[in-house]
Image: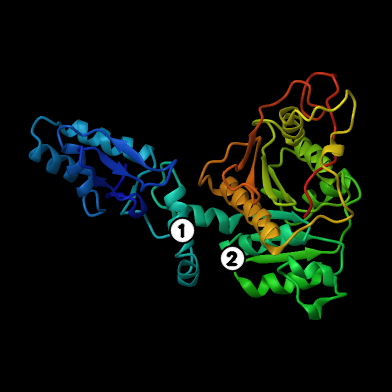
Amino acid sequence: MLGRPRVKPEHSGYQAQDGTVRLGSVVYGIGVEIEDPEGWVWTLVDAMDGTRSVPELADLVSTSHPQITRADVTQAVTDLYEAGHVDDGAAPDPDLSARQMERYSRGVPLLRWLDRSPRPSAWQMQEQLCQARVLLVGLGGTGGYAAQALVASGIGHLHCVDPDTVSLSNLNRQPLYRERDIGRYKAEVAAADLASLNSDVEVTCERRLVEGPEDIADLLRAGAGPYDLLLMCADNPPEIRRWANEVCLRTGTAWVDGGYRGPVATAGVHVPGTGGCWECIRTAEIRRRELGLSPGEDPAVASPRRPWNPVTAVTAGLSGLLVAHAALSLLTGAPPTEPGTMFGINLGALHDPVLLHSGRLPDCPACGTSTESVPQSSDGDDR
């Protein structure tokens, strides 16, 4: 039972000219309209400021609108809470330090705005983040931006893996490194940089080359406990995301991959047992494209590759931040993100965002039940 129901500050409502009550702001996917011909819903919404109990709200509304019963008011409060527009003004303080509450005081309101689940306090989501354990593979452009965003957001433990050293050509899009770091191991530099960003986060980094699926499995087994999430931000070897998909299906580990191909930056969300896997999404994408290729022809010929992928800090940053957004969504539920989805931004056509969803395909070579072969392509986006 809610102690003192409160319309979330970010969802604060108003009464439109036609009498409907609008909550959740004008942001698509969050805002709602409630028909209110008798005006009592607005009376209730206006009174839910976190100072009154449910019985007090029921008394106030039923006195102002005698045709409305106390049970009607109680049910309306419950409905608004279940829809994610109301929290509890009497919720206990989070189990966080005063310093942490100040640090995250700007991020928690955004989580509260995005959250559409019944939750007494948005601080519960921050507590979830502070307890989360994330494994990140690849500390280039995508991985660097993702790591920065997660550490700033208060992830409990972030373990990063990369075998490479810093080169001058990295510096146009990899945010963790400076000219003075050229020649040093990325893992070593990243560990110090990320630790200086947020001392409340446990950041560990290691130099390691992933050479097969068992290396990924070994990384997931390592550490003081299981990881809640894998973030695949590496582009080499080319098969690395296929390996990640195989291992995560085997271990039941949720994971996110992301990268960029020219002006297109994307992230994919994968939860074993829910929706299509990475292979399903890739297959669905190939089939959707209608490339006009001859039977058996490699789909990679339609997307010719150079030894390196054209990239700026913008495209690398977008891909990394999309990965971080997907990670925060999976860890908190705000907003809910459907697994088996790839989403992103095309800087060459902002009016045409990337959004592809696939359920589990029966002929998927990784998670399907059919032995029919499906078209294969290179593993895609660079980091």
Left or right: residue 284 compared with residue 149: right
State the CA–CA distance, disc 1 to disc 2. Answer: 12 Å
| Residue located 43% across and 57% down the image | 109
What residue is rendered at 39% in x and 42% in y?
A: 84
Provide residue 328's location: percent of width, then percent of height: 58, 51
Residue found at the far bottom of this picture = 180
Residue 226 shows up from this direction: no
Q: Secondary structure at mark 1?
A: helix
Q: Is residue 46 above or below residue 160?
A: above
Q: Quadrant of residue 148?
A: bottom right
Q: Residues within 10 Å of mark 2 (few under 14, many from 20)?
A: some
Q: Whole-percent x and y of residue 87?
A: 35, 48
Judging depth in this view, the residue of 87 and 28 nearest the camera is 28
Residue 132 position (above or below residue 2)? below
Residue type at mark 2 is Ala
Q: Is residue 89 above or below residue 335?
A: below
Return the mark for residue 35.
Answer: none
Q: Are marks 1 and 2 in contact (CB under 8 Å)?
A: no
In the rendered view, does 125 fall on the left or right side of 30?
Answer: right
User: Is residue 373 something that shows in the picture?
Assistant: yes
Of marks 1 and 2, which one's residue comes earlier in the chain? 1
Amino acid under disc 1: Val
User: In the image, what residue occupies the spot 51% across and 47% down?
Assistant: 334
Residue identifier under label 2: 152
Identify which residue, 293 or 110, lies in the foreground: 293
> Which residue is disc 1 drawn over?
108
Count of all numbered marks drawn on residues in the image? 2
Say whether residue 196 is left or right of residue 107: right
Closer to the camera, 301 or 198?
301
What x and y, as percent, mark residue 306?
87, 52
